[in-house]
Amino acid sequence: MTDTIASAHLKTIEQRLLWLSHWMIHNANHLRPKTEGIKIGGHQASSASMVSIMTAIYFTALRPEDRVAVKPHAGPVFHAMQYLMGNLDRAKMQNFRGYGGVQSYPSRTKDVDDVDFSTGSVGLGVAITSFASMVQDYIAGKPWGSDLRAGRMIALMGDAEMDEGNIHECLQEGWKHDLRNVWWIIDYNRQSLDGVVREGLWNRIERLFQAFGWEVVRVKYGVLQQAAFAEPGGERLREWIDACPNQLYSALTFSGGAEWRKRLMDDLGDQGDVSALIEARSDADLAALMENLGGNCVETMAAQFAAIDHDRPVCFLAYTVKGWGTPIAGHKDNHGGLMTKAQMQDWQAHMGVPEGQEWEPFATAPDPAALRDFLGRVPFFAAGPRRHQTPALTVPALPAPAGAEQSTQTAFGKILDDLARGDSDLAQRIVTMSPDVTGTTGLGAWVNRRKLWARRPRTDLFREHRIPSTAKWDFSPEGQHIELGIAEMNLFLQLAAAGLSGPLFGKRLIPVGTVYDPFVCRGLDALNYACYQGARFLIAGTPSGVTLAPEGGAHQSISTPLIGMAQDGLASFEPAFAEELAAIMGWSFDYMQREGAGTPDPRTSLTDDKGGAVYLRLTTRPIEQAMLPPDAAQGAIDGAYWLRNPGPNCEVVIAYQGAVAPEAIAAAGLIAEHRRDVAVLAVTSADRLHAGWTAAQRLRRRGQRAASHAETLLGSLPRHASFVTVIDGHPATLSWLGGVAGHRSIALGVDSFGQTGTIADLYRHHGIDTAGVVAAVAEMTDGPAMVPVWA
């Protein structure tokens, strides 16, 4: 096929995508019946500015192994493309942003077409491509990954996304890890939600990328402009374009050819050749010339992509017009604006789409058969769906580490160290990562055995010079720990990328990350994003709570148990004992690999077959290891078990979660000397207990039989029993337990910033020490005025 024919097909595809994406949005907002009277939205202008770029990248440059994160507001173009290729049915398109239709922004878990990375939270979809490339290199360095066919990780992004701090953080991390095979293509339309982007942004962006080793390709002029520049007077036109302020260029674009002519003649007229160049074109032709920026020219973009012959990271700064090719092009309010019915009617005539054929994929194609033949040979689509299926890894037995007194953080490190000593398939696929807190979060032993990862070997100079150190910091492609800088957003993006390694690369990884628990909040947007993608990983927040006493309020987490409960796609645990933790970690490594349909378990109503990510809240406080009952392992996985069983006349239940176990157990012992039948409920996961309880209620409302673990545990308690719950975190975490079977309750916990001190000081200050639990029990049973002698 000649280049001329291929270019003609690309132009046809570009115009088809422009029309179909805009018609889909128009249908949702103006034609589809609405009952709520609100705008549906859809970002027509932001889609238009990307249409030429996406036509060029998908239909000329991409290979099946390449992965793309599509700019959120260009989602309609992506779906239009899948519709054109026959990968999406019309009903989904017609129900854009409706229930069951294509999503507002590309979603790998909720859209049915071939989305590589979910986007929507600005900047995160861009940054994850860098971390996915690092994961790809990580896999390629392993014996079991040597057959991996490396692809490019590509982000199609808006220029306003450069305002996001996580993008700058990931640029630095990429430089440290010798990043390659990444393209970022910036839709430089110079307009954001609230106005026009500041002058001179492009040269600052250029210097930023160059500082971190990227090649910057500025794509400013389309083929029409390049041809005009070669004409007599063309150089003066080029100088005018280069000097024109962004706001003026946008305003003239919206105003059209006559205004272009007036302004250009005012500024450049009576100059011989340049005046002739302008006058030789009609108003329509002049508008087409001035709007033919590089990013709006499919031929120019295709040529720029084809010219890259190396694997260094590349930033394409593609100049575009926001709303290109539509009646709202260039208007500063067009970000969320929509074409009116009248505008769409006129534009439909301009686009040559016959009435009644608005949804026809090939309605305006000059030769539909030839176009279908061309589409059938596009390499990226020829391979079909590109999501890999990977077999699950067997999880070996994880015995609880020995020790009469130990912390959960220590036990976590010992369990990983025991895995590192072996050679199981699971151990080979574990990759750990941490934001510069590897040694202080329990990963030291694992890293010393399994080494740190780098694309090129680096020797530990301390060891080379025989300087004693407990840390053996050898870097190599065989290493299994990725050391990150102090940026929690990067940690969760790296976990997200590694947690998608199976479907993306066909090689399953078991990512394990550690972070200081209070700083989970620093990366919360990226954590939510990782879970929304369906990424599978285990994150240990450690040390946690006011139990990290000497560090003070800035390092003591309060709300993280509630984050664990509220975050979809994340099973949250807070064990107190090593035996519990071993059972939970063994279950977690299997849970992270599940891909079921989400069928409720008849015993718990949890949809564990679906799988997900896991969050462990751990502590550095050593506690005496208790003799646990036989059902403790399964109970720890389900969320709770009776450490001290209730009798038929149980008066008091003390329920605890995590590091406050000694205080709860001691309080029960004191109270039992004066009261009969005191029970102790060991809660390991308020998240799973609560999720199962609410799921069971929801199923019963639908007429189905359902049970939950919380109801099974608490249903036989006498109604007169009272609950006192205690946790080293926000009291709301366990406050709901009394409501399961209708019992009075008091919730103890931490609801204000901590401070420095000993653990005993802080527990006493927050009322979660043994005396505080005893006093709460007395208040529940005797009333607030009664103070028992044992308190």
Image (cartoon, rainbow, N blue to C red):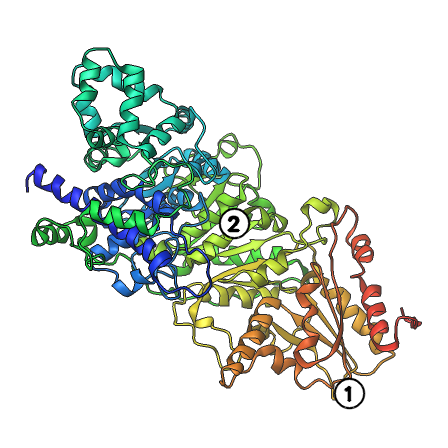
Q: Which residue is drawn at 60% across and 71% down?
A: 690
Q: Name the mark on residue 256.
A: none
The percent coordinates of residue 666 (x first, y second) are: 79, 69
Mark 2 belongs to which amino acid? Answer: Asp
Say above or below: 181 vs 235: below
Q: What element carries label 1?
A: loop
Q: Is mark 2 on a helix, strand or loop?
A: helix
Q: Which residue is label 1 attached to?
A: 649
Mark 1 belongs to which amino acid? Answer: Asn
The percent coordinates of residue 97 (x first, y second) are: 39, 59
**How far is disc 1 from disc 2 in space, using C-alphas?**
47 Å
Contact between labelled residues 2 and 1, with CB atoms less than 8 Å apart:
no
Q: State left or right for residue 564 relative to residue 262.
A: right
Question: Could you say which quadrant of the image residue 127 lies in?
Answer: top left
The percent coordinates of residue 593 (x first, y second) are: 41, 64
Q: State left or right for residue 433 relative to residue 468.
A: left
Q: State left or right for residue 765 relative to residue 12.
A: right
Q: Residues within 10 Å of mark 2 (few under 14, many from 20)?
A: some
View extreme (left): residue = 1
- Of circles 1 and 2, the one toward us is 2
The percent coordinates of residue 757 (x first, y second) are: 79, 48
Q: Which residue is label 2 attached to?
A: 525
Question: Could you say which quadrant of the image residue 298 lies in?
Answer: top left
